[in-house]
Image (cartoon, grey):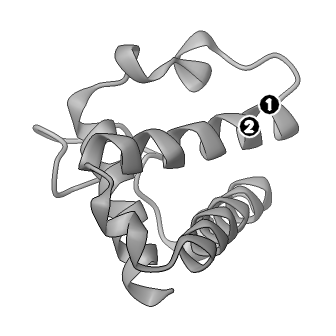
Amino acid sequence: MKRHFPGKSKPGHIVQREETPDWKRRSAAAVFGKVRDFAKVCGDTTAGLIREQKGRFVALCRLAQVHKYIEDPKPSYVADWGALPESQKETDADIFEAVERMA
């Protein structure tokens, strides 16, 4: 997030792992797992996806996790791809590519 976010982020957006709420850690692990599994199943073909497609996949996985853990999420937590700030879109694409390299 720091890489793409213009200016200073809000408190709580970037915290140490120990300070991250348990549901967010479980959510991040689930998103990681979905991306990893997708990359493994697809093999090298994920290299043919454009960054936006990779980012959209991560965003959709994260969105499902928000609905899983938050009963009535704020609209900004469940915003569709087109409403996300560019910094979040780029971060999501980075996440996909980092997991893709590990898979």
Q: Is residue 70 left or right of residue 34?
A: right
* Neighbourhood count class around disc 2 (C-alpha, 10 Å): few under 14, some 14–19, many 20 upward: few
Residue drawn at point x = 74 percent, y = 37 percent: 64
Q: Position of residue 27 (x, y in %)?
A: 72, 56
Q: Position of residue 25 (x, y in %)?
A: 69, 64
Q: Position of residue 29 (x, y in %)?
A: 69, 69
Q: Quadrant of residue 8?
A: top left
Residue drawn at point x = 67 percent, y = 63 percent: 34
Which amino acid lies under the numbered mark 1 shown in the image of this protein?
Answer: His
Please say if the residues under marks 1 and 2 sit with CB atoms less than 8 Å apart.
yes
Instruction: Name the residue tied to disc 2.
Output: 64
Query: Distance from label 1 to label 2 (Cα)?
Result: 5 Å
Which amino acid lies under the numbered mark 2 shown in the image of this protein?
Answer: Ala
Question: Relative to 55, is 101 above or below?
Answer: below
Q: Give SS at disc 1.
A: helix
Q: Residue furthest bottom?
A: 102
Residue drawn at point x = 84 percent, y = 40 percent: 69
Residue drawn at point x = 22 percent, y = 56 percent: 2
Instruction: Name the residue tied to disc 1.
Output: 67
Question: Relative to 90, is 98 above or below?
Answer: below
Q: Give SS at disc 2.
A: helix
* Neighbourhood count class around disc 1 (C-alpha, 10 Å): few under 14, some 14–19, many 20 upward: few
Q: Quadrant of residue 74?
A: top right
